[in-house]
Image (cartoon, rainbow, N blue to C red):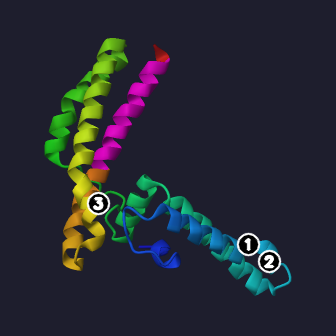
Amino acid sequence: MPMVPDYFTFYQLPETFRPDAAALKRAYYTLSRQYHPDFHATASPEQQQEALHLATLNTNAYRTLSDPDLRMAYILSRYGLLEEGKQEIPADFLMEVMELNEQLMELEAEPNPMAAAQVENEVNILTAKLEAGIEPVIAGYESLAADFRTQALQQIRTYYLKKRYLLRIQESLAKFATRS
């Protein structure tokens, strides 16, 4: 497994699904000034290379940690919870969305704006229910003891996979909307 850089340590912030946006931005701008290649133009090639590496790390860290979905995927990846081929979605959820998938197939064969709106509404309701269910887990993650974090991360992983699945349904609906 490739080593994932620790962006939270890089920014001297606690690992959290809800970082302080102002602190994140401050850390980013401070390090941007510190590692900007222009400030290292007279340095040795090795020092220039190191500054470039740290500037890139800073950009990637900020881009990842400032986006809620990228941040969630990043944290889950750090614990090996989003490895390729291990993305099993719970069977009960698949049963719950089976009807939506059938409606999508019908829409593909025969576009119907009313039916598409109904599917979109059901997806929005499911998404809201998912988010309400995971909210306390995400909010309390930072204060959990290490042995409880493992369980929380599993719950967050399940949420993340379900959310991605619902996003794919929404993307399919959007394609139908542009065709009709």
Return the disc, 1 or 3, that comes first in the chain's sequence: 1
Amino acid type of the residue that numbered disc 3 sits on in the rendered structure: Ile
Image check: 81 left or right of 97? Answer: right
Name of the residue lying farthest toward the right: 42
Q: State the image coordinates of residue 9 (x, y, percent, origin top left).
A: 47, 79
* Residue annotated with mark 2: 39
Q: Is residue 171 magenta?
A: yes
In the rendered image, is residue 79 in sight? yes
Q: Is residue 169 magenta?
A: yes
Pointers 2 and 1 in contact (C-beta within 8 Å): yes
Depth check, front residue: 150 or 135: 135
Q: Quadrant of the N terminus?
A: bottom left
Amino acid type of the residue that numbered disc 1 sits on in the rendered structure: His
* Residue annotated with mark 1: 36
Few, some or many C-alpha atoms within 10 Å of disc 2 (few <14, some 14-19, many ≥20)?
few
Question: Residue at the spot x=79%, y=77% of the render?
Answer: 39
The correct choice, above or below, for 8 with respect to 134 in the image is below
Q: State the image coordinates of residue 52 (x, y, percent, origin top left).
A: 71, 74
Helix, strand or loop status at disc 1: loop
The correct choice, above or below, for 86 with respect to 94 in the image is below
How far apart in space, not on screen, are marks 2 and 1 (Cα)? 6 Å
* Residue annotated with mark 3: 138
